Amino acid sequence: MNVDGPSFLPSHPQNAELERLGDQIAELAAHLDAATARLLDLIREFDARDGWGNGFRSCAHWLAWRIGLELGAAREHVRVARAARLAAAALAGARAR
């Protein structure tokens, strides 16, 4: 897969407008990535502090109820949040050596 961009620039009459749209898409994608990272940090902390322990079976069940995710998607969010914590701890340990 070539991610370097096209080998030629198309000669489209609205090239500048399309370039601006592309820039807006890239900027919004960066904001979504940052928001997703923050969401996973919050889920990790909520899970670690057993914030869901007030009647829910798991953090995923609470997340599905609270923000309307399907249970499978909620489980995946919790799994990724936990894995990110473990990866961060491993990285911190490696840096300390």
Image (cartoon, rainbow, N blue to C red):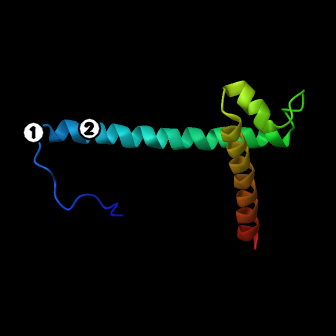
- Residue of label 2: 20
**Numbered disc 2: secondary structure:** helix
User: Quick one: 78 or 31, which is closer to the camera?
Assistant: 78
Q: Residues within 10 Å of mark 2 (few under 14, many from 20)?
A: few
Quadrant showing the N terminus: bottom left
Q: How many marks?
A: 2
Give me the disc on residue 13: 1
Instruction: Please tell me which residue is depicted at 72% across the width and 31% down the height of the picture.
Output: 64
**In this view, the mark in front (2 or 1):** 1
Q: Residue 50, image x and y in percent?
A: 87, 37
Give me the residue at 34% from left, 60% from top.
3
Q: Position of residue 57 (x, y in %)?
A: 86, 35
Whether residue 73 is visible, yes or no, is: yes
Which residue type does callout 2 highlight? Arg
Any mark on residue 57, and which?
none
Q: Amino acid at mark 1?
A: Pro
Q: Secondary structure at mark 1?
A: loop
From the viewer's perspective, tell me whether residue 27 is left or right of residue 12. right
Of residues 41 and 69, the one nearer the viewer is 69
CA–CA distance in space, label 2 to label 1: 14 Å
